């Protein structure tokens, strides 16, 4: 497989764009080598500028759940674009979208659109702080909620110490209100609430964590988050930017039967256009400007093209038994990958929830970031490139989830699994 056109484009990109990319993971730093440039996608496949074809498990990081370039999304965007790309005054799509999300996700009584998941999480945190009149927040190690200052924070030296900036440019003063705890554990949460009585505004959590590979919540853990926040007057925010409309039409909260106070969304509800949203209890949402004292705004929020694309995505997702199909395809991939690893004599932990998955080269269960860090990342790099060169595109980092779409077929999964079997034998 040659990628000479991609190489030339990347060399050019490096001159004008920091690292050649507009989002760091695309630079392939975690796996080595260079990214390829895509100029066409359809169904579960992407084609690079050199004409190479790949079965895609990134799905533009989640939005492409019904496949790339779905005719219904494309025609909805074209029809909307004929009438103008942005108005800066309310448009009817916004009302349809808000109503649709409120119907599909019962914990959401009111919702506000943004242009990215980052903005949605940033705004939800501000709202939680404004509503509770408290400053401190809890997040979990390995969860990603966008590149918000107060959320780009890593754990401090002990469970009860507040976090340290995880990026240059984040003042320590901004990080000092963020407590970072291990995912899937209960005792550190109890200790944190005890040590910060009446000071915690909220917990923000990915109910299934897909930004450090994939962690599935242990039975009872999400319930515990609900209980401890309620008992302490803190809000529970589910970051469903990735899991929303993917794990069920009502997201992870439907799948696990938990009612958070606020939720954030993105990805699928934009159908591949830039989007985010946050919503929840009406009494909390009414704290937002223009009704309340918490300020939040956006020139392109509720953009008609993004709303049209997202609504087409949700329409199509609602129409058929897509979630049963995603579960079936996910299970097929899981079984095949586990068999391939076994045949090659490699220890693999394959975490999967519905259509989200991540395989780690390790023999120990992976419940949180500390577990994930013990996996063999050198082996993952070789596996990634072996798969890519054989026409299967997995996320270019051990610490990302993969996605199956309804556009994948049994034949695509079988081709993926037989490719993996060959590649694993060479590891
Ligand atoms: C992708 C993602 C975000 C950030 O969304 P952007 O649109 O990239 O800003 C936030 N939270 C989670 C869980 C995500 O997966």
Image: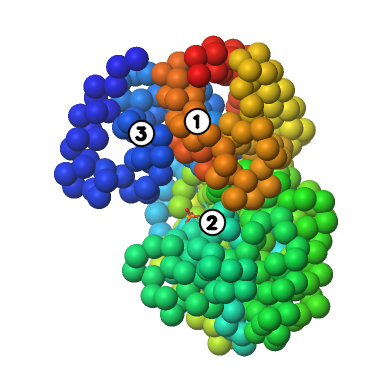
- Say what secondary structure mark 2 lies in: loop
Point out residue 363 in the picture as x, y percentages from the top left corner.
Answer: 66, 32
153 relative to 52, above or below: below
User: Which label lies toward us, 2 or 3?
Assistant: 3
Q: Is residue 297 left or right of residue 159?
A: left
Residue on which disc 2 sits? 144
| The disc label shown at residue 64, or none | none
Determine if the C-beta at disc 2 is less than 8 A from ligand 1: yes
- Say what secondary structure mark 3 lies in: loop
* Sooner in the amino-acid sequence: mark 2 or mark 3: 3
Q: Is residue 393 left or right of residue 249?
A: left
Residue on which disc 1 sits? 380
Q: Residues within 10 Å of mark 3 (few under 14, many from 20)?
A: some
Please report the residue visible at 60 percent of the width from the left and 27 percent of the height from the top. Answer: 407
Point out residue 78 in the picture as x, y percentages from the top left corner.
Answer: 45, 42
Please report the residue visible at 27 percent of the width from the left and 28 percent of the height from the top. Answer: 6
């Amino acid at each position: 497989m040659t990628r000479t056109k991609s190489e030339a484009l990347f060399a050019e990109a490096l001159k004008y764009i920091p690292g050649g990319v507009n989002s760091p993971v695309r630079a392939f730093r975690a796996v080595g080598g260079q990214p390829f440039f895509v100029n066409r996608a359809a169904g579960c496949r992407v084609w690079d500028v050199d004409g190479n074809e790949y079965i895609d498990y990134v799905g533009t990081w989640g939005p492409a759940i019904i496949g790339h370039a779905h005719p219904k999304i494309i025609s909805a965007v074209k029809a909307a674009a004929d009438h103008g790309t942005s108005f800066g005054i309310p448009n009817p799509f916004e009302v349809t979208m808000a109503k649709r999300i409120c119907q599909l996700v019962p914990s959401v009584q009111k919702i506000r659109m943004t242009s990215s998941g980052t903005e949605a999480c940033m705004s939800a945190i501000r709202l939680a702080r404004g509503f509770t009149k408290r400053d401190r927040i809890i997040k979990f190690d390995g969860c990603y909620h966008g590149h918000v200052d107060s959320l780009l924070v890593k754990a401090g030296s002990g469970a009860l110490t507040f976090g340290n900036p995880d990026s240059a440019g984040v003042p320590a003063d901004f990080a000092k209100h963020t407590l970072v705890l291990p995912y899937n554990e209960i005792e550190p949460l109890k200790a944190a609430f005890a040590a910060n009585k009446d000071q915690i505004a909220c917990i923000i959590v990915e109910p299934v964590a897909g930004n450090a590979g994939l962690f599935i919540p242990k039975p009872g853990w999400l319930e515990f988050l609900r209980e401890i926040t309620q008992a302490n007057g803190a809000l529970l925010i589910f970051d469903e930017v990735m899991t929303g409309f993917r794990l069920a039409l009502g997201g992870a909260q439907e799948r696990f039967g938990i009612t958070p106070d606020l939720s954030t969304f993105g990805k699928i509800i934009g159908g591949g256009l830039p989007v985010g949203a946050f919503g929840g209890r009406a009494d909390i949402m009414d704290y937002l400007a223009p009704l309340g004292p918490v300020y939040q705004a956006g020139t392109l929020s509720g953009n008609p093209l993004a709303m049209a694309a997202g609504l087409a995505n949700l329409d199509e997702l609602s129409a058929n038994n897509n979630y049963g199909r995603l579960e079936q395809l996910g299970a097929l991939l899981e079984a095949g990958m586990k068999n391939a690893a076994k045949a090659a004599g490699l220890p693999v932990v394959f975490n999967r929830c519905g259509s989200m998955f991540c395989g780690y080269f390790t023999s120990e269960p992976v419940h949180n970031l500390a577990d994930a860090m013990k996996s063999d990342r050198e082996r993952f790099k070789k596996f990634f490139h072996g798969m890519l060169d054989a026409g299967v595109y997995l996320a270019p980092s051990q610490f990302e989830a993969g996605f199956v779409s309804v556009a994948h077929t049994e034949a695509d999964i079988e081709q993926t699994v037989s490719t993996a079997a060959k590649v694993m034998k060479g590891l």
